[in-house]
Image (cartoon, grey):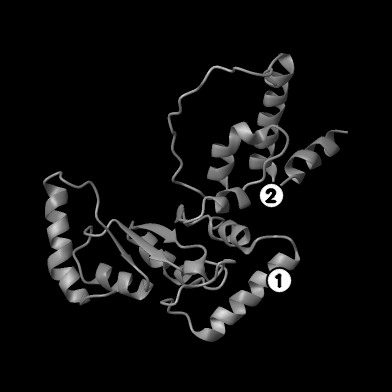
Amino acid sequence: EFTDLRKVAEETLPALVELREKGIVSHVGITDLQPENLKWLVENTPEGTIESILNFCHYCLNDDKLIDYLDYFEERGIGIINASPLSMGLLSQRGVPDWHPAPQSLVEACQKAVQHCLSKNYPIEKLAIQYSVSHPRIATTLFSSANPQNVIKNIEVYGEMHRYIPYLAKNAGFCKIGEKTVQHQARKFGKSKFMGLNRFVNGYLDLLSLWFLDSFGLKPMHVFGFIGTLM
C-alpha cells in the first residue's frame, strides 16, 4: 500500500517465488489494507504466485468489505486471513492513534458504540473479536494487543477453570499462545489447597462444561431438544 503495485508484481513477488522454488521459503502471501490492491496483484501475476492474502480492518463490526472478495480468492485457491478485528483501535476503549486514517465521523460513531457497550457492561473489544472470528469462510483472524489485560477481558473464567485459560483464550480468538518455563519453589509455609479427590472431580466436571459450551453453546436445542423428544 506504500509503493508502486507494479514493482511488487514485477520484482518483489518473482523474487519470493524464486526463493520458494529453492526451498528457502515455504509459501508466498501478500498483505494490504485495501482488498482491491490484493485482487489487482492476483490478476497481474502468474497463477499460483500468491497463495494467501492478509487483509486487515475490513471484516470487523464497522466494515465488512472483505466479504465482497471471498468468492474471488476462494475460486483461485487463495487462503484468506483477516486481521485487526478492533480496526486499529476504532473498536476499543483506548481509542485510535493520531495517525489512524478513519474520518472523524467514523471515529465519533465508534466511540458512541464503545460507550453503549460499557453501559451494558460488555466490552466492545470482546464483541468485536467474537464477530470477526465467527465467519465460517474466514479460517484465521489475527489480533494483537499491547495490553495483556485485554486477554483477561475476553475470556470468562468460572470456578476452577483457571487451569484451562489457554484453551479459553484460544476460543476467544487469541492465536499466539505459548508455554513459559517457570522455576517452582518448595512450599515453606501454609498448606496446599490442591489436595484430595475433590480437585480431580471438579477439574473433570469443568472440562465437561467447556466441551459442552464449545460444542453446543450456539445450538443448545441440539441437546435439550433431543433429550426432550426422548422424554
Q: Nearer the viewer, mark 1 or mark 2?
A: 1
- The quadrant in which the N terminus is found is bottom left
Residue at x 63% of width, y 64% of height: 124
User: Where is residue 227, by image quadrant?
Assistant: top right
- The quadrant in which the C terminus is found is top right
Say whether residue 168 is left or right of residue 200.
left
Residue at x 84% of width, y 38% of height: 229
User: Where does label 1 land, which residue?
Assistant: 116
- Give 83 or 75, whichever is nearer the viewer: 83
User: Where does label 2 land, which residue?
Assistant: 218
Query: How many badges with numbers are in the image?
Result: 2
Tag 1: residue type? His
Image coords of residue 50 (percent x, y):
25, 59
Please report whichever mark, 1 or 2, sits nearer to the chain's N-terminal start.
1
- Give 78 or 178, whichever is nearer the viewer: 178
From this view, report whether residue 197 is shown above or below residue 129.
above
Residue at x 44% of width, y 38% of height: 178
Secondary structure of residue under mark 1 = helix
